[in-house]
Structure formats: C-alpha cells, structure tokens
Image (tube, rainbow, N blue to C red):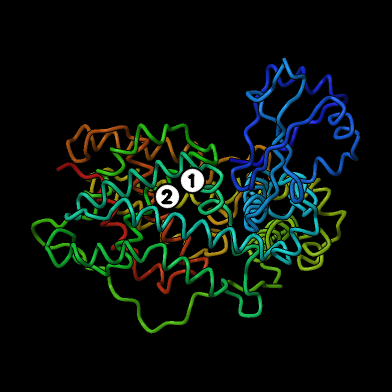
C-alpha cells in the first residue's frame, strides 16, 4: 500500500475537530512511541515549520482518533520514527513503477518520482544513482517476486496437468492483483532504456533473471516428459510456450486492447494451455535444439534510399530509429538527416512526430494483413488454415524483423494517445470468421472464438518477440513449424 502523507491542520482546534471523525493508521514500517499533549502543547506542535511535519523520511505524524479524550482536553499523539531503511527505497520503487507504466519511462523524471513517493530527490539518487538503475532494480525485483509466487503455489503438486492449470490461474490472479507490476514486466520494452549498448544486446543481469523466471517451467516440463505426461521437445521452449498465452492475454487486457475479464477466462485459458502441452498418441513435433548460432542482433540502420519517394523514406527511417533507440530519444533532426530530407519535408507529410509514428503503425498493420489474408481465403481444413496462418505470421516476422519489432515490441500507447491495436480490425474479423467456420465443421473446440484466436496467436507473438529482441538463442525459421503445430494443438477439437 502506498505511504500516505500526514494530515496538516491550521490550528489545534481544527485538529481536535478532525480527530472526532477521522482515523489514520500509522506507518507499519515505523517504530511508534506514544505521548499525551494538552492544547498548549498542540499549539507549539502545529506552529512548527511545515517541512518538519511533511517529510516522511524523518517524521511520520499520525493521530489516532480512538485515543482522543474529551474530558481531559488532551489527545495521544503517536510519533513514528522510521526504523526500516528499506521502507523509503520500497516507496520509491512503487512510485516509479506506477509512473513508468502510466506515463512512460522517458517522460518520467526524478522530480515526478520524488513527489509521488513523498521523498526528497536526493534520496532517489542516493539509493539508485540513475533512473536506469532504478528501472533495472524494479524489473529484477518483480521477476523474482513472480517466480517465487509461482514456485510457492506449485509446491506439492504431483502431476503436470495440475501444475499447468494452477500456474496459469495463479499467474492471471497475480496480474489482476498487481496490474502496474504486471504491466511493467510484460508490456514495457525494457531493452529500450536498459540495453547494454556497447554490445547491442540486453544486459546480462536482465537475461539472467529472465531465465530464472522460466527455470521453474523448464523443471516441471522435464519431469513431466519423464513421466510421459508432457509432449516431447526442448523443455526450455515448451516452458515458454506454456506461459505465452497467459502473458499475451494479460498484456492485451492490461493495455486495454481487448475487453476480457481475466479472472473469468483464467480456467479456460489454463485448459487450453494444458491441451497444447500434454502428450498424445501418435507422433508429435519435437522442438529442435538451436544450432550453434550467434545471438540475434538488432538490424543495422541503412542509409540507402530504397524507397520510391521521400514520404516512404521518412517512414522507413523513422521506423528503424524508433525500433533501435526508442520513440522519445529519436528526434526529427535525426530522421531528416538519415532520410536525406529536410525537416520541412517531414512537417509537410506528417505534421508531428506522433503522426509519423501512427502512420507507420497503420502501414505495417496493412502490410501484415495483406500477407495473412490469403491464408484464410483458402478453406481446406481447420488444421491447415490455423497452422498456415501462424506459419505465415512467423515467416513475415522473419523476413521483416524491424517491422515486426515495431508492431510487437514497442509500447505504442506511451507515445500515441489513440494507439490502435497491432492487428487491423479487418484481419481480426477474418481470423474470427475462420475459427467459427472450423468450429461448425467440428474441427476446432467449442468456446469463444476471440479467446481461442488470441490464445492461439499468443504463443507465436510472445516467442517471436523474445527472439527478435535478443532474449532467445533461436531463429524464427527453426521454430516456425513447431510453433504452428503447438498453436493448432491448443485449439483443435478433442
């Protein structure tokens, strides 16, 4: 719970009147000592400088209404001196988490965080040094918190089915109970402000905690395979696939892109996830081990004038810069210099940087829709259509990694007030129609088509994003067919 600043009163009479109707609980992280004051003492107390009463790092001032004595004309005041040195640090981290989620990392300053946390600006510098260190420590702590929570809830469970169902439900409940934390972990693009830019890849500390977060998944998947309960394949990747549908749906809901009640769909989503992972009769795809390949690196900027006109060149250059260094650090001067146009030309075509970012998003949605639309036009079977759609999506992402990262790695709502979804309404409608048609033919399981559609694509989207951002040592081409099969096994009729 966020720390509340103490209430201030102009006179002792106002304080006594407020005490009759108000109760304020003391800070639980503080040591409390009780003292009794007469009205004269109160007069001296409330004449102190405001800073003395409002600085929570030195004095937590709270008055308990239950200890007001009308007969004696005195009150008991609890002055609480902070004794937990980590309490202030936690307040800073909580305030920063909410601000980074609500208004974005780059627009948030130390002054904003200090005001929200009720601390001095120097306290933030003393505890964290830089804003990026603060952001990194938040990410590490939240990943550990979630991993420990999932580890605790699955203790004592013996079957893989129980583990998948419980983990998925508890993950959804954690996201609902900790919306800002979940959004910070799964929606923010941490590499945008936490990159080890000297190497062009995510910081080793982030990679290490990311692997710790899914280590439990790898463990129970391997044990389930030994018992014959989980399909064959690399446990590491199967553990990621198991988490991906819930992660994707939670991200869409928390960002306001879809209108689901996460708690209402938790059970069905858990069942879908287990049906994707469970062992089945007959042959099943074996997810290949990655070859000895270098880590996927971010595409380099190209200065070639490949576009047919200046507007296309501006759009392509802006897209590359937004992906490589983020929206906020990118300036119109940089875009103009690399695209070899004037700033006036950018203003003529797009007016503002936000308009440019929005037009690029619409352009890429249209292009991706054109690549996937023919798949749904060929009605052969539900299995063929669903598998081909996921394979076509991953193939498009593999051929256009910068475009895919712009669509699925950037958090567009940070810089676009009316950011549209990453997929066009027309494409979503076509996908929904394809699922409904397959349900009528008895090829796809019963259930809400929207949930089935987003859960199915969630596996591909989340793992695709991890690969393109450099978190996984896989190539999309190597896992394309396997992910398409996993997606189909999730929704096919039993």
Q: Quadrant of residue 118?
A: top right
Residue labelled with disc 2: 247
Q: Position of residue 409 (x, y in %)?
A: 55, 57
Label 1, residues with CA under 10 Å away: few <14, some 14-19, many ≥20: many
Q: Which quadrant does the N terminus fall into?
A: top right
Residue at (25% x, 52% y) in the render? 163
Residue at (74% x, 58% y) in the render? 124
For this orientation, the residue located farthest to the bottom is: 292
Q: Position of residue 416 (x, y in %)?
A: 68, 43
Q: Is residue 451 above or below residue 313?
A: above
Residue at (54% x, 51% y) in the render? 187
Q: Nearer the viewer, residue 354 or 372?
A: 354
Q: Secondary structure at mark 2?
A: helix
Compute the Cα span from label 1 to label 2: 6 Å
Residue labelled with disc 1: 251
Q: Nearer the viewer, residue 164 or 460?
A: 164
Report if the CB atoms under discs 1 and 2 are less than 8 Å apart.
Answer: yes
- Left or right, residue 473 beside residue 384: right
Q: Position of residue 345 (x, y in %)?
A: 84, 54
- Left or right, residue 112 beside residue 406: right
Q: Which quadrant does the C terminus fall into?
A: top left
Q: Quadrant of residue 406?
A: bottom right
Label 2, residues with CA under 10 Å away: few <14, some 14-19, many ≥20: many
Q: Is residue 72 above or below residue 460?
A: above
Q: Nearer the viewer, residue 369 or 33?
A: 33
- Left or right, residue 57 beside residue 446: right
Number of disc labels: 2
For this orientation, the residue located farthest to the front is: 72
- Which circle marks residue 488 in the picture? none
Q: Position of residue 149 (x, y in %)?
A: 39, 53
Residue at (35% x, 51% y) in the render? 389
């Amino acid at each position: 719970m966020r720390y509340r600043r103490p209430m201030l009163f102009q006179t002792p009479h106002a304080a006594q009147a407020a005490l009759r109707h108000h109760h304020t609980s003391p800070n639980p992280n503080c040591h409390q000592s009780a003292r009794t004051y007469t009205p004269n003492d109160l007069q001296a107390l409330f004449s102190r400088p405001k800073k003395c009463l409002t600085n929570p790092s030195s004095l937590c001032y709270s008055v308990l209404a239950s200890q007001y004595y009308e007969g004696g004309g005195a009150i008991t005041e609890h002055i609480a001196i902070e004794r937990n040195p980590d309490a202030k640090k936690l307040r800073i981290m909580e305030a920063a988490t909410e601000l980074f989620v609500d208004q974005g990392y780059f627009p948030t300053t130390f002054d904003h965080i200090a005001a929200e946390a009720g601390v001095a600006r120097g306290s933030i510098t003393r505890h964290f040094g830089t804003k990026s260190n603060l952001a990194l420590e938040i990410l590490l702590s939240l990943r550990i918190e979630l991993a420990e929570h999932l580890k605790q809830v699955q203790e004592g469970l013996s079957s893989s089915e129980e583990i998948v169902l419980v983990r998925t439900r508890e993950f959804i409940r954690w996201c609902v109970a900790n919306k800002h934390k979940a959004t910070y972990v799964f929606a923010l693009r941490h590499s945008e402000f936490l990159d080890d830019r000297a190497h062009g890849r995510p910081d080793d500390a982030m990679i290490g905690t990311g692997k710790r977060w899914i280590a439990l998944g790898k463990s129970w998947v391997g044990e389930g395979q030994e018992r014959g309960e989980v399909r064959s394949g690399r446990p590491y990747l199967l553990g990621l696939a198991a988490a991906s549908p819930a992660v994707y749906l939670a991200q869409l809901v928390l960002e306001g892109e879809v209108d689901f009640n996460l708690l209402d769909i938790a059970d069905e989503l858990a069942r879908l996830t287990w049906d994707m992972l469970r062992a089945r009769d007959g042959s099943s795809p074996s997810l290949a081990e990655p070859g000895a390949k270098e880590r996927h690196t971010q595409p380099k900027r190209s200065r070639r004038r490949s576009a047919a006109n200046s507007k296309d060149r501006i759009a392509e250059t802006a897209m590359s810069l937004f992906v490589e260094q983020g929206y906020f650090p990118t300036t119109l001067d940089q875009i103009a210099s690399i695209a070899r146009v004037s700033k006036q030309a950018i203003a003529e075509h797009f007016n503002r940087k936000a308009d440019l970012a929005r037009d690029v998003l619409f352009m890429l949605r249209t292009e991706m829709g054109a690549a996937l639309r023919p798949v749904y036009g060929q009605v052969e079977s539900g299995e063929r259509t669903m598998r081909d759609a996921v394979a076509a999506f991953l193939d498009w992402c593999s051929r256009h990694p910068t475009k895919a990262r712009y669509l699925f790695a950037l958090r567009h709502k940070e810089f676009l007030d009316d950011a549209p979804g990453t997929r066009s309404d027309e494409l979503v409608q076509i996908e929904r129609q394809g699922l409904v048609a397959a349900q009528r033919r008895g090829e796809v399981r019963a259930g809400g088509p929207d949930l089935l559609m987003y859960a199915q694509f969630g596996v591909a989207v989340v793992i695709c994003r991890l690969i393109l951002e450099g978190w996984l040592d896989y190539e999309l081409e190597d896992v394309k067919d396997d992910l398409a099969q996993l997606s189909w096994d999730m929704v096919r009729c039993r």
